[in-house]
Amino acid sequence: MAARALPEGPAVIPVCPPRPDNESMRIETLRERLRALGAGPRHENRVLRLWSQALPQDKGPRRLQDFMPRALLAELPRIEADLAALARLQSAHPAQDGSERMLVELTDGQAVESVLLPREGLCISSQVGCAVGCVFCMTGREGLVRHVTSGEMVAQVVLARQRRPVRKVVFMGMGEPAHNLEQVLEAIDLLGTWGNIGHKSLVLSTVGDPRVFEALPQQRVRPALALSLHTTRADLRAELLPRAPRLTPEDIVDAGERYARESGYPIQYQWTLIEGVNDSQAELDGIVRLLKGKFGVLNMIPFNEVGGLTFRRPSWERAAEIARHLHRRGVLTKLRQSAGQDVEGGCGQLRARATKPSGRVIPLQAVAG
Ligand code: SF4
């Protein structure tokens, strides 16, 4: 079956560098601030541990004044207030499947989405907007506004932990983590150590970028990896993901397989299933050719129809038939709904509804219709 003509992506992608004062929202800058107040490694790690686990700074049997440097003790309330301001809940939208979409306001008034997932999972955003411009994604339509800092990423986890336990964090929300890799890895390092999240339960999702494949094996906290495949055809991939690195599907699977063997974690290959675009028999044959025998799992997610995008969602029966077909041919395939579908289908829609053209967030109640 021939793929349908694809609608064009946004013509102009505004790409802005991160604001200079975002430096003050990085974990590394917080560490420097603590050290300047006389913190030793024990004090520094204590502050980071309690913050990232959403616990109060005076938690524990010992009085702070008995062991904290005096300057740090005096500054602690201001530090706590600054950390709390990194991510504030703007609105929360529970769904029938147990997930909850949150619109999160950052210090400068920008907003990102985080999603509490069933079974103590959380999906967080690594950028405001995204430069990859995937044609089936709301976030991709607005281009990149700015990076989310490592502090703001951990703050999304803290905010979520104030509502529910969180034992798994996936970097699959707004943004391409490979484009903000240094800060993503900084957040992963803290979450996988003092944040008490298992390394295998941290999942970095990327469209496939050589920088990710080079950097991950060198980390002390190595996350699991999700790779967005979406098609087995290099030409169609260039249309669907117009600003992704020009790696072929074969290149991506080869690099993924190396990391899977090295880390011991299976790769999660992501496939947004779009009717008439990437659901042909030729694509299914291509999936078997690429993924059979590989250390990975294929997550197939039927496209969520959203206003402004002309793609169609296949029926659940058709998607289930495809998953069974692939399973029979030796590819471990899981058919998934995107979380919180009944409230606001895909990533980027809450923000799209709740932002003015300036990109600053306005109260969601004011635009809810
Ligand atoms: S699907 Fe992911 S990588 Fe593609 S535009 Fe959306 S946020 Fe960016």
Image: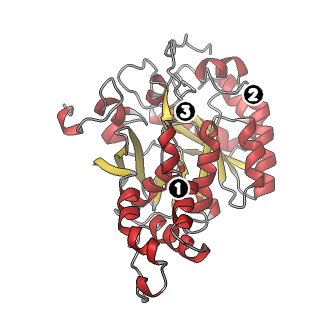
Quadrant in which the C terminus is drawn? top left
Rendering quarter of residue 349: top left
Rendering quarter of residue 324: top right
Look at the numbered disc 2 and say if its residue's Cβ is closer than 8 Å to ligand 1. Answer: no
Q: Residues within 10 Å of mark 2 (few under 14, many from 20)?
A: some
Residue highlighted by disc 3: 272
- Say above or below: 261 vs 71: above
Between 174 and 19, the one nearer to me in the picture: 19
Q: Position of residue 329 (x, y in %)?
A: 72, 40
Residue 81 appears in view? yes
Left or right placement of residue 214 versus residue 165 in this view: right
Look at the numbered disc 3 and say if its residue's Cβ is closer than 8 Å to ligand 1. Answer: yes
At label 3, the amino acid type is Thr
Marker disc for residue 169 = 1
Q: Are marks 2 and 1 in contact (CB under 8 Å)?
A: no
Q: Earlier in the sequence, mark 2 or mark 1?
A: 1
Q: Secondary structure at mark 3?
A: strand
Q: Earlier in the sequence, mark 1 or mark 3?
A: 1
Q: CA distance from mark 1 to mark 3?
A: 21 Å
Left or right placement of residue 265 versus residue 160 in this view: right
Residue 96 appears in view? no
Between 334 and 156, the one nearer to me in the picture: 156
- Say above or below: 205 vs 242: below
Q: Residues within 10 Å of mark 1 (few under 14, many from 20)?
A: many
Q: Residues within 10 Å of mark 3 (few under 14, many from 20)?
A: many
Marker disc for residue 141 = none
Left or right placement of residue 28 versus residue 362 in this view: right
Residue highlighted by disc 2: 247
Q: Residue at x 45, y 62 (%)?
A: 120
Q: CA distance from mark 2 to mark 1?
A: 27 Å
Q: Position of residue 211 (x, y in %)?
A: 73, 39
Q: Secondary structure at mark 1?
A: strand
